[in-house]
Image (cartoon, rainbow, N blue to C red):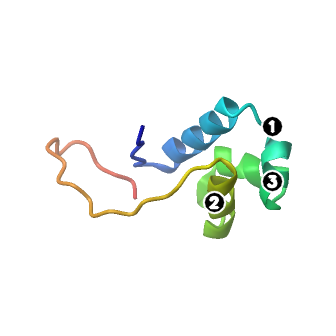
Amino acid sequence: MDTIIFTSQQLAKTLKSRRKALRLTQKEVASLVGILPKTVSALESDPDRCSVESLRKLLAALRLECVVAPKAEIADSDQKAEW
């Protein structure tokens, strides 16, 4: 199932949920791709403070991908994207 991310908090929640679904600890997922457990923690709590490279590595460890596509028109004008 695809998840469309509008905010950094949605990204954080999605990353943490996926890691837990794979039954991996932060330490285990960090060791898979050579990042520190504190980097995983930061991405799962405040991804705005992390580098794109760290995000890319975590996505690889969680077997996720990032897709960039043109933004669709949002019918509800009250719904505003953070990004």
Q: CA distance from mark 2 to mark 1?
A: 17 Å
In front: label 3 or label 1: 3
Q: CA distance from mark 2 to mark 3?
A: 13 Å
At x 83% / y 61%, what residue is drawn? 34
Pick whichever, 72 or 64, lies toward us. 64
Mark 3–mark 1 CB contact (< 8 Å): no
Amino acid on which disc 3 is placed: Leu
Amino acid on which disc 1 is placed: Thr
Kindly identify which numbered label has been placed on residue 53: none
Please tell me in which quadrant of the rendered image residue 19 appears: top right
Could you tell me residue 50's position as x and y percent? 66, 62
Please tell me in which quadrant of the rendered image residue 70 appears: bottom left
Q: Secondary structure at mark 3?
A: helix
Tag 3 residue: 32
Q: CA distance from mark 3 to mark 1?
A: 11 Å
Tag 2 residue: 55
At x 53% / y 44%, what residue is drawn? 9
Mark 2–mark 3 CB contact (< 8 Å): no
Instruction: Tell me: 4 left or right of 48.
Output: left
Q: Earlier in the sequence, mark 3 or mark 1?
A: 1
Q: Earlier in the sequence, mark 2 or mark 3?
A: 3
Tag 1 residue: 25
Q: Secondary structure at mark 2?
A: helix
Q: Earlier in the sequence, mark 2 or mark 1?
A: 1
Number of numbered callouts drawn: 3
- Give the farthest residue toward the left: 75
